[in-house]
Image (cartoon, rainbow, N blue to C red):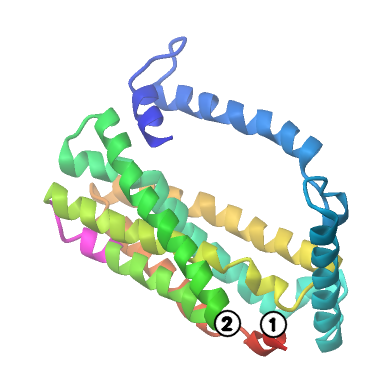
Amino acid sequence: GAPLAGWVLGVKFFGMKGWQGLFIIEAIPAIIFAFILVRWMADSPKEAQWLEEDERQWLITQFEEENARKKSTKDYTIWQALSDKEVIKLCLTYFLWITGFWGFGYWMPTVLKSTSNWSNLAVGWMIVIPMMLSLFFMLWIGHRSSVTGEKRWHGAIGTFIAAVGLLCGTMSNHPIWAFFFLCVTAIGIYAPFGVWWSYPTNFLSGPAAAGAIGMINSFGNIGGFVGPYITGYLKNLTGSFTLGWIYLAGSLIVSGLLMLTMRRDVDLERS
C-alpha cells in the first residue's frame, strides 16, 4: 500500500490535494470489505462452513473448556469487567502504546522524506521494508510467546525497542541512519500485536470479554488521534520532529512498563 500511496500523493483528483485523494481512495476498499465481512465471517466455529466436522467439534470443545477455566477463576459480568482495575490498566496501556504507534506511523513518511529528500514514490517503496520486517517480527513474537507461555515481556520489549529507535532517530540526520532507526522503531512498535489481545481474553470470556475489548480499543482510538496531533503540534512549535519523537518514545516506555505489571495467567493457559 505504501508505494501506491506515494504515487497517489503526487496526483490531484478533482482539485483536491494529494493527501485528500489518498484518504478517499484508501477508504473505498475498507467500505467494500466491511460488507463482505458481515456477509461471510462466522460468529463461532459452529457457523464456520469451511471447517471439517472434526475440526469444528475440536474447536468448540477447546473453546468451552477454556471458558470454563476462566469462569472457575472468576466469573465476571460485563459491568464488573469494565470497572476491573486490570481492564482499566489495559485501557491506559493501549492508549499510550497506540499514541506512539499512530504518532510514528502518521509522520514516518514525512520524517523520512525530510531527511532524505526522496520523492513521494521512493519514500513509499522504502516504507515497504520496515513494514515487512515488522510483519515477520510480530509473527515471531506471537509464536515465541505461545511456546514459552510468557506474555508480559513479549509485549513490553517491542515498545522499548521502538522507544530506542525513536530516540536514536532524533540524533541522526543522515538518510541511511534515519531509515535504519525508522526500521527499528517500526519493528518494535508492531511487535506487541503478536500477544496483545490475549491479555484481556486470559481472564475474561463471553460478553465480559467483548465489552472490555471494545472499551480497550476505544481508548486506543483516542490515542490514535492524540499521538499524531501532539507530534504535529510540537513540530509546528519547534520546527523539528525531535520533541515530538521524544514525546512518543516516552509514551511507549510507560506503556511497556505497564505491560510488565499485568497479571500473570500463564498457569491458567497451561492447566
The quadrant the C terminus occupies is bottom right
Residue 75 on the magenta segment: no
What amino acid type is highlighted by mark number 1? Glu
Residue at 26% across, 65% down:
167
Direction from residue 244 to residue 75 in the image, left or right: right
Residue 139 in percent (x, y) is at 49, 62
Residue 156 sits above or below residue 107 on the image: below
Q: Is residue 140 above or below residue 265?
A: above
Image coordinates for residue 54, horizontal then vertical, percent: 83, 61
Q: Nearer the viewer, residue 237 or 128?
A: 128
Residue 162 vs residue 236, the one in the foreground: 162
Q: Circle 1 is placed at which residue position? A: 269
- Which amino acid type is marked by label 2? Gly
Report if the CB atoms under discs 1 and 2 are less than 8 Å apart: yes
- Please identify the residue farthest to the left as the structure is shown: 174
Numbered disc 2: secondary structure: loop
Q: Which residues are magenta?
A: 166-173
Q: Is residue 230 visible?
A: no
Residue in the image at 51% along x and 83% along y: 260
Which residue is found at the position 19% from the left and 34% from the top?
118
**Mark 1 or 2, nearer chain start:** 2
Helix, strand or loop for disc 1: helix
* Distance CA(mark 1)–CA(mark 2): 8 Å
Estimate how packed mark 1 is, as few (under 14), some (14 to 19) or many (20 or more) residues with alpha carbons within 10 Å.
few
Relative placement, left or right, of 166 versus 106 is left
